[in-house]
């Protein structure tokens, strides 16, 4: 029972009750673990950190510590969820195969929403992500490591994409020519954002970089946001990407791997803008406020680029459930990109 012996690196307990997979992330593996210690049932989250993607797990944990320490000193009205250390005081346990494991408290009576939610939940989440940005604005972003170098460096992602198209490692370029051609439509958006980042018009901020519904914990009874979770990709960045990823994940009426036609929910966009600006409207620079929806087009175009690149590379990054999964995701995001671009004024 590997989960049991891994859990024993973190806890003393008498009776092991089991491990169940939770969540729908594409990168790490998360389990709810249950055991009894002195006849008291206890539950935690056990997670294997994907060290092929997060290549410096210790640096990542150090980032999380810096962010949590800072938040704990701010007026930040949400819970902080601190990792549980191993019995010998480490934040990570490395198993004999070289996997990195960590444990978080399991917050009772809470839930992380699945992909599609109601506007009230979107408003709550946007407010929580806005409060996170507000509380982190007094932290020097450059003191955080890039846990995935160049995560939103879309210029670099474009170079990787064109390189893969040229090399054609999975022999999928020919059949994907409509998607490769459509990708060009996003280039002006990528260039505009890149210019504003380089000129300083978009200042460097601390950004969360995975602002989906499932990364906010909600109270099961009140449906109020309790905590912003998943601090693995908190890095220096531009605020546009956090708002953009909210629009990308909350505003479509279909999830990102749905093969049927997607549409945009205007009520969601309004709820996201209202919730986010409530916490950020008075301190964001004018250019940041003005370009929030451009940020949504940017991040959605970039996500299409990432899925398409992974499809053409032979599915080396995202977990897939069936052979064309990444292609279907890329098409969905391309369609969504067009709809969002039409909203940019
Ligand atoms: C990955 O694992 P998950 O679902 O939280 C990815 C995000 C993508 C998302 C697309 C570290 O996030 O950037 O937007 O998939 N995370 C990483 O579904 O690459
Ligand atoms: Mg994540």
Image: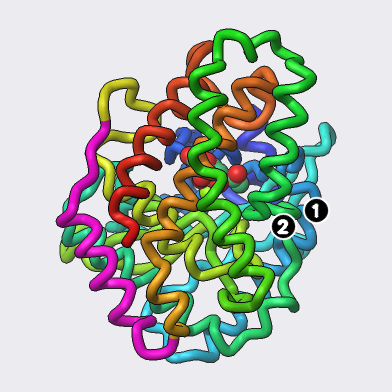
Name the residue beneath numbered marker 1: 56
Disc ID at residue 147 = 2
* Picture quarter with the C terminus: bottom left
**Is the stretch drawn in magenta largely helix, strand or loop?**
helix
User: Residue sitting at 69 percent across and 50 percent down?
Assistant: 155
Horizontal side of 240 relative to 235 (left or right) equals left
Horizontal side of 220 relative to 8 (left or right) equals left
Q: Residues within 10 Å of mark 1 (few under 14, many from 20)?
A: some
User: Residue sitting at 36 percent across and 47 percent down?
Assistant: 249
Quadrant of residue 284 in the image?
bottom left
Query: Would you say the beta carbon of the disc 1 residue lies within 8 angstroms of ligand 1?
Result: no
Q: Nearer the viewer, mark 2 or mark 1?
A: 2
User: Residue sitting at 62 percent across and 37 percent down?
Assistant: 4
At numbered mark 2, what does the secondary structure look like: helix, strand or loop? loop
Q: Are marks 2 and 1 in contact (CB under 8 Å)?
A: yes
The range drawn in magenta is 262-283
Residue 281 drawn in magenta: yes
Q: Using the image, determine if residue 16 lies above or below residue 91.
A: above
Is residue 344 in sight in this rendering? Answer: yes
């Amino acid at each position: 029972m590997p989960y049991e012996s891994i859990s024993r690196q973190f806890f003393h307990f008498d009776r092991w009750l089991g491990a169940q997979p939770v969540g729908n992330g594409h990168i790490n593996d998360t389990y709810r673990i249950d055991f009894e210690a002195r006849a008291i049932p206890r539950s935690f989250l056990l997670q294997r950190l994907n060290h092929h993607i997060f290549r410096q797990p210790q640096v990542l944990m150090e980032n999380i510590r810096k962010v949590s320490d800072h938040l704990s000193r701010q007026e930040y009205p949400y819970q902080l969820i601190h990792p549980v250390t191993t019995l010998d005081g480490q934040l990570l346990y490395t198993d004999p195969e070289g996997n990195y494991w960590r444990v978080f408290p399991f917050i009772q009576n809470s839930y992380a929403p699945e992909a599609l939610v109601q506007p009230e939940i979107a408003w709550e989440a946007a407010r929580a992500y806005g409060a996170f940005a507000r509380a982190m604005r007094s932290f020097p972003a450059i003191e955080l490591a890039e846990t995935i170098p160049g995560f939103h460096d879309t210029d670099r992602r474009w170079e990787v994409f064109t390189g893969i198209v040229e090399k054609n490692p999975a022999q999928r370029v020919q059949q994907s020519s409509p998607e490769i051609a459509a990708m060009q439509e996003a280039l002006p958006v990528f260039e505009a954002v890149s210019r504003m980042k380089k000129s300083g018009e978009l200042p460097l901020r601390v950004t969360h970089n995975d602002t989906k519904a499932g990364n906010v914990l909600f109270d099961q009874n009140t449906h109020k946001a309790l905590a912003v979770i998943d601090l693995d990709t908190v890095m220096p960045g531009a605020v546009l990407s956090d708002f953009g990823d909210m629009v990308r994940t909350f505003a479509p009426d279909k999830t990102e791997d749905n093969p049927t036609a997607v549409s945009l929910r205007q009520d969601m966009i309004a709820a996201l803008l209202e919730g986010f600006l409530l916490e950020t409207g008075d301190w964001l620079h004018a250019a940041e406020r003005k370009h929030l929806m451009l940020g949504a087009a940017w991040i959605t175009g970039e996500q299409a680029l990432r899925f398409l690149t992974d499809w053409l590379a032979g599915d080396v990054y995202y977990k897939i459930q069936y052979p064309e999964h990444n292609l279907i995701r890329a098409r969905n995001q391309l369609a969504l990109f067009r709809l969002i671009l039409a909203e940019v004024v």
